[in-house]
Image: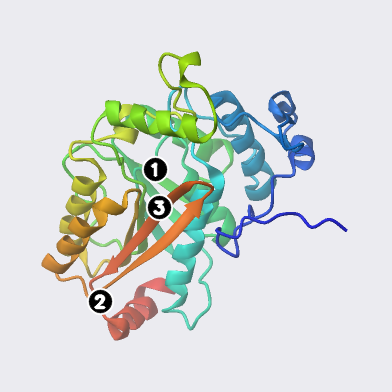
Amino acid sequence: MTQVPTKTNLHPRNQHRERYDFAQLIVSSPELAAFVSVNKYGNDSIDFVDPAAVKALNRALLKQYYQINEWDVPEQYLCPPIPGRADYIHYLADLLAESNGGDIPRGDTVHVLDIGVGANCIYPLIGNASYGWHFVGTDIDEVALANAQHIVDANKLSDDIELRLQSSTADVFSGVTYADEYFALTLSNPPFHASLAEARRGSQRKWQNLGKESNKHKKPVLNFGGQSMELCCEGGEEAFVTRMIEESADGGDHCLWFTTLISKSASLPRAYDALQHYCAVDSRTIEMSQGQKKSRLLAWTFMDKKQRQAWWEKHGKK
């Protein structure tokens, strides 16, 4: 019997460790069939530089694995790779288990804050479907939030996912959280480029890695899309994460673990310096990868182990 290859770099609980079963995905989402063909290795696949194909694959994955029956993003908005986003959620679950006797906490008493939820609303969708957690998602883009709200409403998830507009581009937590709110986790996939030109260069490298000739397209296609505010900010992810760490110090007793993705390893030293400067008690760096894409999950807390246990007993189980 032929064994199905697994993507062993993904988290053990990730449902996407095996090669995509396109035949089954097409049963769940017939529109995907138009984008599936046999690649040079003799396997069913899609053209991953085609934004429409990537969107169709995401719809099928969300429907089959997460019971999301209606999902879409506006043209040119970020269309994220599902397996990597699921990995982030599963590693966060492991982090929470440390304060819950080794068991992953499930249910809507676990409140999670998603900074930059985006038009795709992907982390709340996966996190709620996988563990039943309650999410608050924030964003500075009203169009993105309107689309995310449509996804939430269409899938009858308004009791589980709440969305808020961040009116200040200079703030991360301030203005979107309340004084009496407590979160087990915050998560974020910050804009990691300093400019759109840098984002396009990154897309060019993706094309080359996928064996596509860039001269077929004068401007490399951002196959996962992305508005400028999703892809870049002044100072790139290094500046954004540093600001996040600075603000987190003001609410260190209101959150068990602050976390963010770090796309570039070169951003870590400044983040570590900020964590030390603002007196984080504990921090973790977890390496993650999906295909050729490598990233890191940076987590920090302002509580020691005993304080985290007490916090969890008071706020995590109510």
Q: Nearer the viewer, mark 3 or mark 1?
A: 3
Q: Amino acid at mark 1?
A: Val
Q: Position of residue 199 (x, y in %)?
A: 33, 31
> Which residue is rendered at x = 57% and y = 43% of the image?
156
| Residue 172 visible in this rendered orientation of the protein | no
Which label belongs to residue 303? Answer: 2
Looking at the image, is 285 positioned above or below residue 235? below
- Looking at marks 3 and 2 on the same chain, the residue that comes earlier in the sequence is marked by 3
Q: CA distance from mark 3 to mark 1?
A: 18 Å
Find disc 1 in the rendering and name its residue.
117
> Which residue is rendered at x = 22% and y = 75% of the image?
281
Between 71 and 77, the residue placed more toward the observer is 77
Looking at the image, is 5 positioned above or below residue 49? below
Q: Is residue 7 left or right of residue 279?
A: right
Find disc 3 in the rendering and name its residue.
295
Tell me, yes or no, whether the two marked residues, 3 and 1, touch with CB atoms within 8 Å: no
Q: Position of residue 125 (x, y in %)?
A: 52, 47
